[in-house]
Amino acid sequence: MAGFSFGPIDKVQATAGGNRRLRPWDIYEVKFVEAKYETFEGKKEENKGQIYEALTVRFENDEGYYEERIFNPGEKGNERFENTNAEGHKYYSASPMERLRIFIAQMLTVLAPEKMPKMVELAPKVQSFKQLCEVFAKLLEGAKGKTTHLKLAGKTDSKTNRIVPCLPKF
């Protein structure tokens, strides 16, 4: 029987590796990295083969990164959802399309205010979610590396039941 062998320790990475997600409930000084259009194929049995479209925007700093991913609002994207708060009062939240409009307007206003008039001009001509994402990404191309402040709130991830970072509600 062989004896216990701990092995070499000189090549062990003793600190967390990679870039971590920024934590919720804080304001960070970050650099804008990119905005891009992405597609994903469904993995679960009920949506296998279905293609999902998303706009992904990434920010980074020395502490980590934050990515906001907004999926194509689809045909029912203009519908508002009725919610009930803790006191039992009903209210309507912004529709997915309204949140997308506010997000794009805020990003351009903060990162590339000189490009906002161009977006106002091009927005009515956009024919698809993909085209919208590509126009938005192109307008923000010159803002890559720009430093700004990012406020992150938190929400409960339904899969893990953990608090994860998110942008505050608009």
Image (cartoon, rainbow, N blue to C red):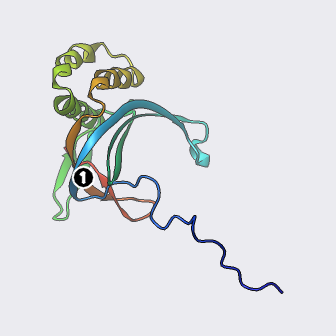
User: Would you identify the image quadrant in which residue 130 lies?
Assistant: top left
Q: Amino acid at mark 1?
A: Leu
Please tell me which residue is depicted at 28% across the width and 40% down the height of the picture.
31
Find residue 50 and report its horizontal and vertical position in percent: 56, 36
| SS at mark 1 in the image | strand
Q: Is residue 6 left or right of residue 69?
A: right
Q: Pick the quarter of the image with the N terminus.
A: bottom right
Where 158 sits versus 141, above or below? below
Tally of numbered tags: 1
Q: Is residue 10 left or right of residue 121?
A: right
Q: Is residue 114 left or right of residue 163?
A: left
Please tell me which residue is depicted at 40% across the width and 33% down the height of the picture.
72
User: Would you identify the image quadrant in which residue 124 lies?
Assistant: top left
Q: Pick the quarter of the image with the C terminus.
A: top left
Tell me if residue 165 can be seen.
Answer: yes
Find residue 110 and report its horizontal and vertical position in percent: 17, 33
Q: Which residue is mark 1?
A: 152
In front here: 114 or 40?
A: 114
Find residue 36 and report its horizontal and vertical position in percent: 40, 30
Find residue 106 and report its horizontal and vertical position in percent: 19, 34
